[in-house]
């Protein structure tokens, strides 16, 4: 795969979710991403429609980790194009179908754990910690503070850049690793210790959370009258309520998104009063 082709797949990968649908999920996005590569493998335009039909079948994975699928499918597509007999082509087609299905499941599992389950909450904690370090005390009402716009938005920018730096690196590197990986290299996935990365990030996030918790306890405990006030007790009960409910959402069959929306609405109402 040439450097230019990798750039094309990388750029198009940002549109993987554009054609998302309930029938076949990311199939339109996958076909869009892979089209430049397929055009180089199949020079005759008459071959493309039948090839694209395979990419328009169901496909669904974590968007950042999908790049490993792009690279691995591209390598397998080259092998199929070079098949000398019909039997050899069918064998490699079967391998292509198995690869597409199994790799999409693996990358979805890893990506959900890394990006949605670890990196997103970590960058949120990072932003909150930066605000606290800059003396933006979110335990006090806003009118009592003088907030500099750069300080307020600076933490958000740092969190945004931290998340996307990892996402862009995985998006770019995954294409070449998936394409160049040897047959026993799990399509480039073994180049990173994902479990260790997730564990260390969660550990660091727990340290940040403990720092925020200690900061909050100090703020309320150094003023006992404030700590025993009705506002603090009410807010503490509401937080504990939503934490408890979040542990039971699966059993209660409540979508987490609805719970988060309800929590944000109630937190804002309570904060205003």
Image (cartoon, rainbow, N blue to C red):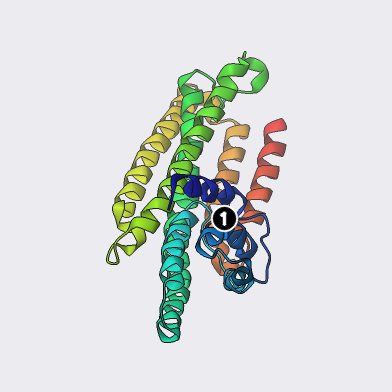
Query: Helix, strand or loop at disc 1?
Result: helix
Q: Residue at x 68, y 68 (%)?
A: 22
User: From the viewer's perspective, is residue 237 above or below residue 28?
Assistant: above
Q: How many marks?
A: 1
Front residue (pair 255, 191): 191
Q: Is residue 189 left or right of residue 50?
A: left
Q: Quadrant of residue 142?
A: top right
Q: Quadrant of residue 83?
A: bottom left
Residue 273 makes an appearance in the image: no
Coordinates of residue 266 in the picture (x, y in percent): 69, 43
Coordinates of residue 171 in the picture (x, y in percent): 47, 48
Q: Quick one: label 1, few (<14), some, or many (20+) residues within 10 Å?
A: some
Q: Residue at x 50, y 29 (%)?
A: 158
Q: Which residue is mark 1?
A: 36
Q: Residue at x 47, y 75 (%)?
A: 97
Residue 47 makes an appearance in the image: yes
Q: Is residue 171 left or right of residue 249?
A: left
């Amino acid at each position: 795969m040439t450097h230019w082709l990798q750039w094309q797949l990388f750029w198009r990968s940002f549109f993987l979710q554009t054609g998302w649908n309930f029938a076949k999920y990311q199939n339109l996005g996958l076909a869009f991403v892979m089209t430049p590569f397929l055009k180089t493998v199949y020079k005759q335009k008459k071959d493309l429609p039948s090839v694209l039909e395979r990419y328009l079948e169901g496909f669904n994975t974590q968007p950042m980790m999908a790049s490993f699928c792009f690279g691995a499918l591209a390598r397998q597509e080259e092998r199929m194009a070079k098949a000398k007999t019909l039997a050899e082509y069918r064998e490699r087609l079967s391998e292509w179908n198995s690869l597409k299905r199994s790799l999409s499941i693996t990358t979805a599992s890893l990506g959900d754990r890394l990006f949605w389950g670890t990196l997103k909450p970590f960058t949120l904690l990072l932003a909150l910690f930066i605000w606290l370090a800059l003396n933006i005390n979110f335990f006090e009402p806003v009118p009592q503070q003088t907030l500099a716009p750069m300080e307020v938005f600076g933490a958000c920018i740092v969190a945004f850049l931290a998340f996307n730096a990892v996402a862009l690196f995985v998006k770019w590197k995954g294409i070449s690793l998936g394409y160049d990986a040897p047959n026993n290299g799990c399509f480039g996935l073994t180049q990173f210790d994902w479990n260790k990365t997730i564990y260390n990030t969660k550990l660091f996030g727990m340290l940040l959370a403990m720092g925020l918790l200690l900061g909050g306890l100090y703020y309320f405990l150094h003023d006992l009258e404030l700590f025993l006030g009705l506002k603090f007790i009410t807010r503490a009960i509401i937080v504990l309520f939503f934490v408890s409910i979040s542990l039971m959402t699966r059993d209660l069959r409540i979508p987490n998104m609805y719970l988060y929306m309800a929590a944000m609405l109630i937190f804002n109402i309570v904060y205003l009063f």
